[in-house]
Amino acid sequence: MPRSPRPSYTEREMVPLLAIGPEAIELDRLVAVACARSEESAGSDGAVVTFLGLVRNHNAGRRVRYLEYEAYEPLALKTFERIAAEARARWPGARLALHHRIGRLDIGEASVAIAAASAHRADAYAACRYAIERVKQIAPIWKREFFDGGDVWIEGAIADPTNETARAEAERIACV
């Protein structure tokens, strides 16, 4: 299948920094929107780090057939906004773009993507890692795994968003 051309600047503007929904994740567009800056600060990014979470074919000794994600979408977006604000406060030059899918996802499909752009690579790496740790901690997103012989709910938010101990742990992991 031929690749679509790179999105134009006006198309990039229509891609939100933060999103949740059934649409396939387009990593190139996510990176473009993370790097989009005002004309005054254009070219200020020296690093872009991406994380792409994929549906794998195994877990806990079982063959996974597919996953289904469910979320409380309005609260998930507010949570993504909180995570982006926390990252900006800790790494002031970093800009995050974060998209998460919901619905049925087959093996090999991307479930979550994060792009962190910053002037310096250390901040981009840390902000990206911090974002995925916080998504796992506080986003109202639940994963149901379907395997040969059954299914099980295996993940969901584990911490209160205001829990400073959980936030500090995510930062500790990000800065290792």
Image: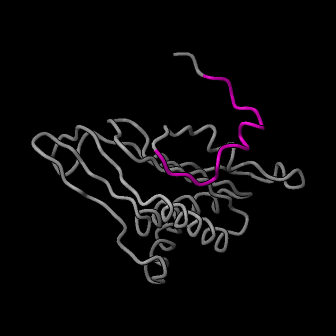
Q: Could you tell whether 45 is left or right of 109 in the image?
A: right
Figure disc tally: 0
| Residue at 50% over, 51% down | 20
**Whole-percent x and y of residue 111?**
42, 45
Compared across the picture, whether 168 is left or right of 105 comes to right
Query: Of residues 160 and 86, which is closer to you in this image?
Result: 160
Q: Nearer the viewer, residue 28 or 174?
A: 28
Q: Relative to 3, say whether 140 is above or below.
A: below
| Image position of 56 (left or right of 110) | left
Q: Position of residue 122 (x, y in %)?
A: 63, 61
The residue that appears at 49% across and 39% down in the rendered structure is 23
> Could you say which quadrant of the image residue 22 lies in?
top left
Query: What colouring style does the render use?
Result: one colour
Q: Is residue 118 left or right of residue 101?
A: right
Does residue 115 sit above or below 176 in this rendering? above
Which residue is depicted at the point 45% across and 82% down? 163
* Residue found at the far top of this picture: 1
Residue placed farthest to the right in the image?
40
Q: Position of residue 123 (x, y in %)?
A: 64, 63
Is residue 58 magenta-colored? no
Q: Which residues are magenta?
A: 4-21
Residue 139 position, x and y percent, is 44, 64
Q: Quadrant of residue 71?
A: bottom left
